[in-house]
Image (cartoon, rainbow, N blue to C red):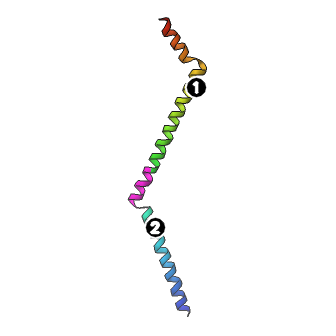
Amino acid sequence: MKRILWFIIGTAVGVYAVTRLKKRAQVLAPESLQQSAEKVASAIRHFGDEVRAGMAERETELRDALGIDTAANEREDYR
């Protein structure tokens, strides 16, 4: 009876281990790595775009607050 119990436990652990290893192999496969790299690159591009948009918006706010664009336009009008 003990041998049958240990055989069943060993078989269950073996099946579980093989299943987990197959999932790990799929995650580490080159296709999966490529998809992960594409996701990271996309996230970095999106972050850069957001930063540039924020910088442009803030620069416009600062120029308006300091009157830089207005002063440049006035100098051109005097010429």
Give residue 66's position: percent from left, percent from top: 60, 19
Q: Position of residue 57 (x, y in %)?
A: 55, 29
Q: Secondary structure at mark 1?
A: helix
Under mark 1, the amino acid is Glu
Name above or below for residue 10 compared with residue 43: below
Which circle's residue, 2 or 1, is located before the other in the chain?
A: 2
Q: Is residue 26 left or right of residue 66?
A: left
In the image, residue 56 above or below residue 41: above
Residue tagged 1: 61
| Residue 61 on image: x %, y % | 58, 25
Q: Nearer the viewer, residue 38 or 6?
A: 38
Q: Tell me, yes or no, whether the highlighted magenta stretch contains residue 34.
A: yes
Q: How many marks?
A: 2
Task: Say which of marks 2 and 1 sits in front.
Answer: 1
- Magenta stretch, residue numbers: 28-38
Q: Quadrant of residue 22?
A: bottom left
User: Residue at 51% of width from left, 41% of height from top?
Assistant: 47
Disc 2 marks which residue?
Answer: 23
User: What is the distance, in whole Å, between disc 2 and disc 1 at their CAs?
Assistant: 52 Å
Asked if residue 35 is positioned above or below residue 13 in the image, the reply reads: above
The residue lying at 55 percent from left, 94 percent from top is: 1
Instruction: In the displayed orientation, state which residue is furthest to the front.
Output: 77
| Extreme-right residue of the structure | 65
| Mark linked to residue 12 | none
Instruction: Give amino acid for label 2.
Output: Lys
Q: Main secondary structure of the magenta part?
A: helix
Element class at badge 2:
helix
Q: Which residue is rendered at x = 43% and y = 66% of the image?
A: 25
Q: Bin the neighbour count of mark 2 within 10 Å (Cα to Cα): few under 14, some 14-19, many 20 and up.
A: few
